[in-house]
Amino acid sequence: MSGGGKHPTQIGRYRIDRILGTGAMGVVYLAHDPAIDRPVALKLIRADLLDDDSRRDYVDRFTAEARAVGRFHHANIVSLYDLSIHEGNPFLVMEYIQGESLYQALKRGGRLAPEIAVEIMQQVLDALAAAHASGIVHRDVKPANVMIAPGRLVKMMDFGIARFDTSNLTQPGTVIGTPRYMSPEQILGKTVDARGDLFSSGVVLHEMLSGTPPFDGGSMTETIQKILMSEPPDLSVYDSSISSGIAAVVRKALAKDPIDRYPDAKTMAAALRAGAAVPHDDPTTVARPSVAALPVAPLSASSMSAVSLSAASVSAEEVVRVERALAMIVGPIAKIMVKRALSSARTSEDLWLALSGQISSEGERAQFLSHRAPRH
């Protein structure tokens, strides 16, 4: 990139058409690849703005990004085509997505209908599940990094601050990310794993449903304090059509302690699908747990007796067993699913089989059914 604020007309073999976006460390251009005759997005990093030591570290991390994204292909992740150097500065050439970012969509429309928000988040979680399986943590999940292509196809972008689980490029104590979407452990400079991305996904889902992030403050300090100390607002305040199941998924994703969140993106996606299937006007109500509550915490005798049974042949103890087993798969919405299934289950076996039919993964279905009491 030339000085004086001017932008290049050519980078490598790529013809620069216009600027798509700018940031503190670089620019993203719409460019044309003459070899393939297609439009591409070219991300040029201003590594020359850094001192020598920082420059080397940054270029190493930038190269790691390219290798991370280039290792696999996924329908919901922007494809990487090329990596090279221009005037001492590294650049990436990526798939150009026609559409708009989720940030632009929210800015224009305020918030999304629950069914659309769930559809978008399911694709985000699918992308994250693929990345996490390859040892990559995104670390900056936010609406600006979620592109919406025609047909509401989601494309996750900008793994520019991603890290390998085995990499030393990003150490504990280094805070990287966008404050209002950061997990508590990321803000505190602690080690961040895939569950940090799930917290950020919960923030994004809350924003899609309500039109505002759950921990937004008037300043960065206030935002950070809320993330660390405050519980998220009740989503029903914004829209009564948001089902209790979806709200439960958001609360669990936003747990302060990573251990209280979903263990992985696949599990969160399954819980969200199940939660979206719960009608918003379901007469069954459930006590709202705190964000730190474990879904499989021991139940007291009083809570056992509070379980309403539609079939006398299904004991309260058996219902508790089913709830605990199902909660390991779908989280806190398990109680809702069990109560709904009880309306038609005549026996405990009916209950187990009805609920297992709502679990799409064969492995998770087998895990759930393994908790049944032995038959005699």
Image (cartoon, grey):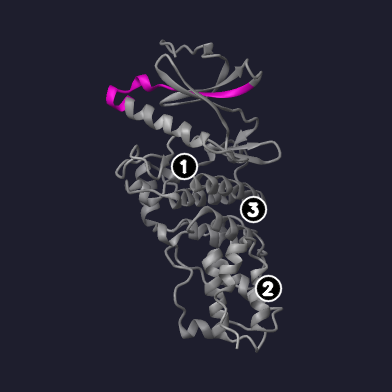
The structure residue drawn at horizontal position 69% and vertical position 36%, both measured from the top left corner, is 150
Dividing the image into 4 quarters, which one contains the N terminus?
top left
The structure residue drawn at horizontal position 60% and vertical position 88%, both measured from the top left corner, is 376
Task: Judge by depth and name the residue closer to the eye, 95 or 291.
Answer: 95
Task: Judge by depth and name the residue closer to the eye, 153 or 84.
Answer: 84
Query: In the rendering, which numbered label is found on residue 354?
Result: 2
Check disc 3 and report the residue beneath it: 114
Residues at marks 2 and 3, CA–CA distance in whole angstroms: 26 Å
Task: Judge by depth and name the residue closer to the eye, 173 or 241.
Answer: 173
Task: State if disc 2 and disc 1 touch (CB < 8 Å).
Answer: no
In the displayed structure image, the side of residue 249 where residue 185 appears, left or right: left
From which residue to which does the magenta span run? Answer: 39-55
The amino acid pointed to by label 2 is Ala
In the displayed structure image, the side of residue 66 where residue 375 appears, left or right: right
Residues at marks 1 and 3, CA–CA distance in whole angstroms: 25 Å
Task: State if disc 3 and disc 2 touch (CB < 8 Å).
Answer: no
Element on which disc 2 rests: helix
In the displayed structure image, the side of residue 54 where residue 262 appears, left or right: right
Q: Sequence order check: which comes first, mark 1 or mark 2?
A: 1
Q: Is residue 370 above or below residue 105?
A: below
Mark closer to the observer (1, 3): 1
Residues at marks 1 and 2, CA–CA distance in whole angstroms: 37 Å
The amino acid pointed to by label 3 is Pro
Residue 201 placement (x, y as % from top left) = 51, 49
Task: State if disc 3 and disc 1 touch (CB < 8 Å).
Answer: no
Q: Mark 3: give few (<14), some (14-19) or many (20+) Cα within 10 Å.
A: some
Q: Sequence order check: which comes first, mark 2 or mark 3?
A: 3
Check disc 1 and report the residue beneath it: 138
Q: Is residue 310 above or below residue 88?
A: below
